[in-house]
């Protein structure tokens, strides 16, 4: 007799009550990346990280064997998942047949996420993956245009009837729990009603992304943790809630847990740029060769160390071969610098980066002729772990490729499945890190960002300056990407308002000016003949509080909002990240 299905908090406790969660990311939370993220914790703690697969399309997954094979690999090829799901087929599977995704020894706990709008197709896809995961998740948070065209993700949020049927069908007919991830609504009250509907349909866990549907790209802005806190206080205590949004560094995890009262914290972009985000820094003096700590105490895992670890996992699990023999990572304290790069660490000679240089026009022409003559055609790599390598490397090396163009160019030319090309990127990265470390020894101040509280930092909801200062590290350290906030993006010209939006804002501005309120919502100064002494005290208090209430004598106080907040050079986008690196949901 099959064991009763656990749900809700009982289910959450059965998988270890994980506090750290790797978000579902389209083509980016695949097996190797999950293994890399877990590798920064001691072996006995790695199962404390709950991971989600990338978002899969339920219809394609249920109908297309090729799509399944290219996205989910729970069994060693040529063994495939049964279609339709077959209990007898599963009985013939032994431990030796288990492969990557959902492998009980190395890839659990694991939730598989689908986007869907058809309850029957969603159930069929879920039944196929159920033997290889702990739960199935419904994506209700994807805000991208493709989700709008396909009528799924966040664009289902007005269709409560369909959402209820999708979740309830799995709740009643699937052997494992169903969960859901969604975005907050226009108001906290509407968000609460939305969450109650999802829970009533049978969702065992809800993940709440603290941003609304329109908050994406340059309009991303900050997630609203207060809405998640409101849900925590209003929903039954046994409700399991994961919080998502605003996680840039490891310290943000505890801040989020404290602010929201959530059971766990999910990280997406923070994890992409720094896969060590769930790990803790080694003690002072025990950094070794992988972790770097500056004299100011700030540090992080070195980009060359993370890239090397990533490639090693790929060699072992995907290519089934031992990684190449490599020298130890360089440290300035080494008495005999390795041969990996030059010995003075300043400027690499032409012969040193010949592999990383772009081919000449003549070389390109000759290569094209040779390819045409031989008729050689390279098949497109469809392995989900290999096709994700280039965008992952751009994320890991984002702070480095902005100044080391040889690394950037070599990475841009790399093809999915060409492991030698990525080994070359690693070689160039190690040389670049070596240069940086030696330069730091000569002039540490050149690379350090002081923690200065400046009035120009302004409101964190309007300015990213303080976050940039907090997160900034030397280029050889993996670090988060701090997105410019919408106000900053507008000032830089990165964000353009539509004509309709500009007309709406102009109309609002005119209405507010007529009412004596500035365009940003603050009460404007009103020129009167009231003596200065009667208003100074109130005005200074109002300016310090940042609120624009009228004072008691009938005059209004001025709030200075004319200061423009500029994004620092540290957050300028210098490298085009491939579209595969897009985070959705």
Image (tube, rainbow, N blue to C red):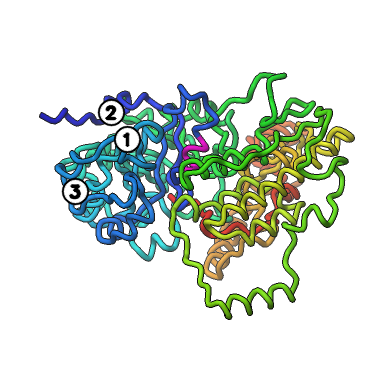
| Mark 3 or mark 1, whichever is nearer to me | 3
**Farthest left residue in view:** 1
Residue 541 colored in magenta in the image: no
**For the residues bearing labels 3 and 2, Cβ distance under 8 angstroms:** no
Q: Looking at the picture, how far across and down is residue 135, in whole percent? A: 29, 38
| Mark 3 or mark 2, whichever is nearer to me | 3
Region of the chain picked out in magenta, as a range:
32-37
Q: Would residue 546 be found to the left or right of residue 89 on screen?
A: right
Q: Which of the labelled discs sits on residue 85, or is there none?
A: 3
**For the residues bearing labels 2 and 1, Cβ distance under 8 angstroms:** yes
Q: Looking at the picture, how far across and down is residue 262, in whole percent? A: 42, 29
Quarter of the figure that contains the N terminus: top left
Label 2: few (<14), some (14–19) or many (≥20) C-alpha neighbours in 10 Å:
some
Q: Which residue is mark 2?
A: 11
Q: Residue at 80% of width from left, 52% of height from top?
A: 352
Q: Earlier in the sequence, mark 3 or mark 2?
A: 2
Query: What whole-number distance in Å separates the C-alpha atoms at marks 2 and 1?
Result: 9 Å
Q: Residue at 64% of width from left, 52% of height from top?
A: 487
């Amino acid at each position: 007799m099959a064991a009763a299905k656990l749900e809700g908090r009982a289910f959450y406790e059965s998988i270890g009550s994980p506090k750290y969660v790797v978000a579902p990311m389209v083509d980016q939370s695949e097996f190797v990346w999950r293994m890399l993220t877990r590798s920064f914790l001691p072996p006995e703690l790695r199962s404390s990280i709950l991971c989600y697969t990338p978002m899969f399309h339920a219809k394609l997954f249920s109908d297309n064997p090729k799509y399944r094979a290219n996205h989910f690999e729970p069994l060693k090829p040529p063994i495939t998942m049964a279609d339709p799901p077959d209990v007898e087929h599963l009985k013939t599977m032994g431990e030796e047949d288990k492969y990557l995704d959902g492998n009980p020894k190395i890839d659990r706990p694991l939730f598989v996420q689908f986007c869907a709008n058809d309850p029957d197709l969603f159930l069929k896809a879920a039944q196929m993956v159920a033997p290889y995961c702990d739960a199935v998740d419904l994506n209700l948070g994807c805000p991208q245009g493709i989700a709008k065209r396909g009528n799924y993700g966040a664009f289902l949020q007005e269709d409560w009837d369909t959402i209820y049927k999708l979740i309830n069908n799995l709740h009643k007919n699937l052997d494992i729990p169903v969960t859901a991830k969604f975005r907050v609504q226009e108001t906290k009250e509407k968000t609460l009603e939305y969450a109650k509907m999802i829970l009533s349909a049978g969702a065992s866990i809800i993940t709440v992304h603290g941003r609304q549907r329109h908050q994406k790209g340059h309009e991303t802005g900050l997630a609203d943790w207060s809405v998640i806190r409101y849900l925590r206080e209003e929903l039954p205590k046994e409700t399991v809630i994961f919080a998502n949004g605003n996680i840039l560094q490891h310290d943000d995890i505890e801040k989020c847990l404290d602010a929201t009262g959530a059971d766990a914290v999910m990280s997406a972009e923070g994890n992409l740029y720094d896969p060590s985000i769930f790990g803790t820094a080694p003690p002072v003096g025990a950094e070794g060769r992988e972790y770097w700590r500056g004299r100011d105490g700030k540090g992080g895992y070195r980009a060359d160390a993370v890239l090397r670890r990533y490639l090693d996992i790929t060699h072992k699990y995907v290519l089934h071969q031992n990684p190449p023999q490599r020298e130890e990572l360089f440290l300035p304290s080494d008495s005999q610098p390795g041969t990996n790069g030059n010995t003075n660490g300043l400027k690499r000679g032409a012969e040193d980066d010949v592999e990383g240089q772009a081919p000449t026009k003549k070389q390109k022409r000759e290569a094209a002729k040779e390819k045409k003559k031989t008729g050689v055609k390279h098949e497109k790599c469809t392995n989900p772990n290999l096709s994700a390598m280039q965008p992952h490397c751009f994320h890991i090396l984002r702070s480095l490729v902005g100044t080391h163009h040889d690394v950037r160019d070599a990475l841009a030319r790399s093809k999915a499945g060409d492991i030698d090309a990525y080994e070359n990127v690693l070689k160039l990265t190690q040389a670049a890190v070596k240069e940086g470390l030696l330069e730091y020894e000569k002039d540490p101040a050149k690379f350090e960002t002081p923690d200065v509280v400046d009035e120009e930092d302004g409101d964190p909801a309007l300015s990213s300056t303080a976050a940039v200062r907090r997160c900034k590290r030397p280029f050889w350290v993996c670090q988060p990407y701090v997105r410019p906030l919408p106000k900053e993006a507008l000032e830089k010209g990165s964000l353009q308002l539509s004509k309709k939006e500009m007309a709406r804002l102009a109309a609002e501005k005119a209405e507010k000016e007529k009412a004596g309120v500035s365009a940003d919502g603050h009460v404007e100064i009103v020129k009167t003949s009231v003596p200065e002494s009667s208003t100074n005290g109130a005005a200074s208090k109002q300016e310090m509080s940042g609120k624009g209430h009228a004072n008691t004598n009938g005059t209004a106080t001025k709030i200075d909002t004319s200061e423009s907040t500029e994004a620092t050079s540290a957050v300028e986008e210098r490298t085009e990240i491939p579209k595969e690196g897009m985070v959705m949901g």
